[in-house]
Amino acid sequence: TRCKAIAQQAKQQTSHSRSSSDMSCRPRLLRHGKVGLIATHKLRLVKFPAFMEQQRDADTYHKHLFVHIGGSATYADPLLEAVDVRQIYDKFPEKKGGLKELYDKGPQNAFFLVKFWADLNTNIQDEAGAFYGVTSQYESNENMTITCSTKVCSFGKQVVEKVETEYARFENGRFVYRIHRSPMCEYRS
């Protein structure tokens, strides 16, 4: 098992001005695999599973979860740590501007940084034809267009980057954003 980090940003694609008070919102860092509520007043990450699926025939189906972020948070869950993004800029590659550029594009109150342990040990013998995917879901009280930029870093190097745009669907009194079974690039270790 190796440590992975995903910088996930969802940003509103309408023009707006940011005041200096927006800078007080810091990304939340989740440690040790304990999942709490990952949210701001504007946007909440509901779930984020990364997985590999393989179906050899109609009767044989295998799924391996590398990571699953989500579930119900309770008051017993540990609080997430607020981290000043300037303390961790150097931990992420600067290939296309890095974490600093991603965070500066804003809004900072919709920026999440999650550090977790991924389970890379799979019992699937033959990975040929396997599907590597990510599903993510967000909720908001606001109707907006979000852009999700997902970066996976391993040993200080960016190995995956994907940018997707999602539009809201109004469900049960809130706006829901779903990116379902989005293919990962050919990353295997």
Image (cartoon, rainbow, N blue to C red):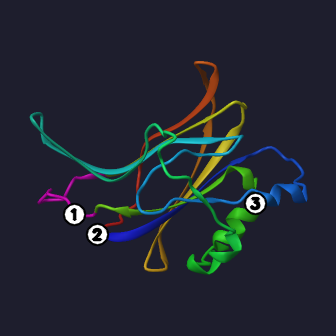
Circle 1 or circle 3, nearest the eye: 1
Q: Earlier in the sequence, mark 1 or mark 2?
A: 2
Q: Give the residue at mark 3.
A: 105
Q: CA distance from mark 1 to mark 2?
A: 7 Å
Foreground residue among 26 and 172: 26
Asked if the residue under mark 2 is in contact with the one under mark 1, i.e. CB atoms within 8 Å, the reply is yes
- Which residue does the image show at 12% across and 34% down from the upper left? 58
Q: Give the residue at mark 2.
A: 1
| Residue 174 coordinates in the image, percent (x, y) | 64, 25
The secondary structure that dominates the magenta segment is: loop
Disc 1 residue type?
Asn
Q: Give the residue at mark 1.
A: 121
Q: Residues within 10 Å of mark 2 (few under 14, many from 20)?
A: few
Foreground residue among 40 and 184: 40
- Which residue does the image show at 11% across and 60% down from the upper left? 125
Region of the chain picked out in magenta, as a range: 120-131
Q: CA distance from mark 2 to mark 3?
A: 32 Å
Q: CA distance from mark 1 to mark 3?
A: 36 Å
| Residue 115 coordinates in the image, percent (x, y) | 48, 64
